[in-house]
Amino acid sequence: MWLYKGKIIKKIKDLPKKTFGFVYQTTHLPTDLKYIGKKSLIYNQKKKLTKKELAEYTGAGRKPKTRKTQKESDWKTYYGSHSKIKGLLKEGKENDFEREILQVAYNKKELTYLECKWQFKCEVLELDEYLNYNILGKFFDKDFV
């Protein structure tokens, strides 16, 4: 279950229109350890064209081999990418977590910006309560100790 501004979010329609993704905070309730990350709601996927689709192609130039499709991501069941979170989830401890949407984004670039903004604002590399150990793969917690 995701919380956003005090409301439970169960489907994409529960979020503001044209939301691309969101910045979230996952909290492990027994230890109060937190993780801040981002999640896209939809992702683009390349699919190979079938023989029938290739035969029906009437455009000029070289025939394309793939087409782009969009698919809903696993955002409903997502808790975070940190190995500690994944390990606890494998043990079936989903109820030990609280997931909160901090802010929504309307495009990919904004989503990355907002994730960095929240991570710097919450000082995830400096405070022990956060599991994050890097920001953008450029700033690491070990560099600040």
Image: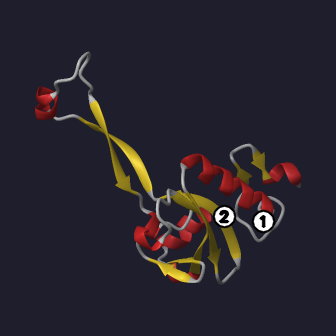
Q: Would you say the residues marked 2 and 1 are in contact, meaning their CB atoms lie under 8 Å apart? A: yes
Place residue 59 in its image quadrant. top left
Place of residue 92 in the rendered image (x, y in percent of width and height, measured from the top left) = 47, 77
Q: Residue at x 41, y 70 (%)?
A: 13
Q: Residue furthest right?
A: 145
Which is nearer the eye, 67 or 31? Answer: 67
Place residue 99 in its image quadrant. bottom right
Place residue 74 in its image quadrant. bottom left
Label 1 sits on residue? 122
Q: Residues within 10 Å of mark 1 (few under 14, many from 20)?
A: few
What mark, if any, has residue 105 been given in the picture? none
Which structural element holds mark 1? loop
Q: Amino acid at mark 2?
A: Ile
Place of residue 81 in the rendered image (x, y in percent of width and height, measured from the top left) = 57, 59
N-terminal label among 2 and 1: 2
Q: Amino acid at mark 1?
A: Cys
Q: Which image quadrant: the C terminus?
A: bottom right
Q: CA distance from mark 2 to mark 1?
A: 9 Å
Place of residue 102 in the rendered image (x, y in percent of width and height, measured from the top left) = 64, 69
Label 2 sits on residue? 36
Colour scheme in use? secondary structure
Which is nearer the eye, 25 or 34? Answer: 25
Residue 23 placement, left or right of 66: right
Residue 102 placement, left or right of 90: right
Which is nearer the eye, 62 or 144? Answer: 62
Which structural element holds mark 2? strand
Place of residue 95 in the rendered image (x, y in percent of width and height, measured from the top left) = 52, 83
Q: Residue at x 45, y 74 (%)?
A: 14
Q: Is residue 53 above or below residue 90?
A: above
